[in-house]
Image (cartoon, rainbow, N blue to C red):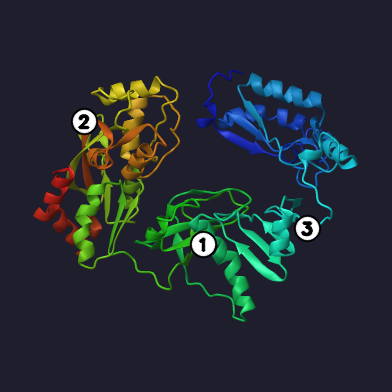
Amino acid sequence: MTTSDGLWHKDAVFYELHVRAFKDGNDDGIGDFAGLTSQLDYFKELGVDCLWLLPFFKSPLRDDGYDVSDYRAIHPDYGTMADFEKFLEAAHARGLRVVADLVMNHTSDQHAWFQAARRSPDSPFRHYYVWSDDDQTYRYRDASGDTMPIHVDDDFAKSVGLPGIIAHGVALKPGKPLCLAVCDGKPVVILPGFPTSAMFTFHDMIVPVLRRMAGLPPRSDAKVTAKVPVRIASELGRTEFVMVSLVEGDRGLIAYPSGKGSGAITSFAQADGFLRIDALADQMPAGTEAEVTLFTPHVRVPDLMIVGSHCTGLDLVIAPLARAGLLVRSIAVGSLGGLAAAKRGECDFAPIHLFDDTTESYNVPFLADGLELVPGWRRMQGVVFRAGDARFEGLTTAQDAVRAALADPSCIMVNRNQGAGTRILIGRLLGGARPEGYWNQPRSHNAVAAAVAQHRADWGMTIAPVAHAAGLGFIPLAEEHYDFALVRARKLRPAVQAFLEALASEESRAALAQAGFRPA
C-alpha cells in the first residue's frame, strides 16, 4: 500500500460497514473478521477503494461498540488480533485501504483508564473525565440516547437553577446543536446559531410544546405531494429537512432541492417548503413521490420556470418581467441538469453553454427532440484570483495559470458543481489533477468569486463581469455562447413570449452590454 498521496480520500469510494452485521465466518450468527476477509474480492468488484469499519474494539456493547473498554483488543465476537491482522494484510494486498472508527472523546466505564481514575483523585487519568458529586446535575442525553457528563460552572448552574441541561444535541439536520434545559421549573430552549438550524428545530420540537402548553391543538401545516427529480444524499441517523422549490411538471408538481446546510439562509428566498428524509435512510432516490410541507398555506407556481446554468446576465433580462408582475423562478443546476429538466418538461427554458469537441460548436449538438435554441449572449470565462497574487500576476493564459496553481500544493481552488458547463472547462484544464479545494463545488459564478475574495480559495473559474465586479484579477480562457434551450411545447405560453420579447429588447441588450456581455 502506498500512502504518498495525502489527498487520496478526495476521490476514494468508501464502503462503511459494521463487522458484526456483515459476514459470519464461523456460523455463530455474528459477523466477524474471518467472514469479512472472505468478501474482499467482492469489494474490489464494486470498485471500493477504502473500507470504513465501525468500532470493533473490546466493549460491553452498551453503545454499539462506541463504549470502548480496550483500544488494543478486538471484541471476541469478531475474532482475535491475528484474525484482524490477516484481514488487514489481505485488504492491502488487494489495494484496499482500511479506516477504523476510533472513538477518543469517551470510553466505557469498564476501561482501565476510567477504573483507575475512579479509584483515586490523584490518578494520572483523572483529568481524562469530568466528575460530579452526584449522578444527575451535570448529565445530558445526546442524540443517540446516551446520558453523559458535561462540565458546567457551579456559579452558572446555581444562577440558572436546577436540574439544568436535560438534552444537548438532537438527531436533526440541520439543527443538531439544540439545547434544552429546565431551570427551577422553567423550560429553557437554546436554539442553534445558524438560521436554518434554528428554524427547523423550532418548527419540529418547540412549536408542538408551546401549542400544548397553551392548550392549542397540534399545528396543521399545508402539505402537497411532489416528485423529486434528482437523488438527494442524506446522513444516516439524523432526520434531515431539505428545502425545495416547486415547479409544475407535465404530470404534477416537481420538487427541486434549493440548498442544504445550516447556514443557507438565502435558500429560503427560493424555497416553497421542505421535505423530510427519515433518519434510517441514506438518500432519497430520484423519482420519489415526497410530501412537501409548505412555508405558506398556498403554492403559487411560477409563471416562468428557468432551470440550468447560472449567469448574472439572466437577472438583467428577467427584471422587466418581475416589474410587470410575472413570477419568474431560476434554479441553478448546471447546463446538463437544465437540459435534463427540459427533456422532462419541468421548465420553460434551460440556459446552457456546452461546447461540442466533434463539431466545434456550442449548444446545438446537445439539443434533443422537442427543444429549440434561442440565442442569448456571449461571455468571457477565465481564471479568477486576488489581485497582487504573485503566482498569477503577469500570466496571460488560463493554461499557464492552472499550471502555476498546480505547482504550489498550498494553492487552493474552488470548483463548480457537477453538470455545470464551467465545471467541464475546469476539468479540461486540470486533466486528471485534483488539487486542494477540488470538492468545494458552489453552484454560481458569484459564489466562486466570493470564495476567492474572502480568502477561502486562491483561484477558480468564473465570468469576466463577476470577476471585475468583485475587484479580482482575471485571466481569460474563452468566449462562450450562453444560450437557451426552449421547450417547444411551451413556446406559446404568455410568460415564455414575454421572456423572448425581453431578451430581444433594446433595453435588455443595452443592459447586457453595459454589464460586460456581448448580446448575440
Question: Where is 349 relative to 186, above or below?
Answer: above
Can you say which quadrant of the picture contains the N terminus? top right
Q: Secondary structure at mark 2?
A: loop
Farthest front residue?
Answer: 155
Q: Position of residue 186 (x, y in %)?
A: 68, 70
Q: Amino acid at mark 2?
A: Glu
- The quadrant holding residue 487 is bottom left
Q: Is residue 303 left or right of residue 259?
A: left
The residue wearing badge 1 is 199
Tell me the tag on residue 109: none
Write the residue at 87% across / 42% down: 118
Q: Examine the rendering and report whether any part of residue 409 can be seen.
A: yes
Q: CA distance from mark 1 to mark 2?
A: 49 Å
- Which sits earlier in the primary sequence, circle 1 or circle 2? 1
Tell me the tag on residue 360: 2
Q: CA distance from mark 1 to mark 3?
A: 29 Å
The front one of 280 and 57 is 57
The residue wearing badge 3 is 137
Question: Where is 247 relative to 454, above or below?
Answer: below
Q: CA distance from mark 2 to mark 3?
A: 71 Å
The tally of labels here is 3
Q: Secondary structure at mark 3?
A: loop
- Which sits earlier in the primary sequence, circle 2 or circle 3? 3
Q: Amino acid at mark 3?
A: Thr
Q: Position of residue 520 (x, y in %)?
A: 13, 44
- Which sits earlier in the primary sequence, circle 1 or circle 3? 3
Write the residue at 28% across / 36% down: 472
Write the residue at 22% across / 31% down: 478
The front one of 19 and 318 is 318
Write the residue at 36% across / 44% down: 447
Q: Is residue 235 left or right of residue 440?
A: right
Q: Position of residue 366 (x, y in %)?
A: 27, 40
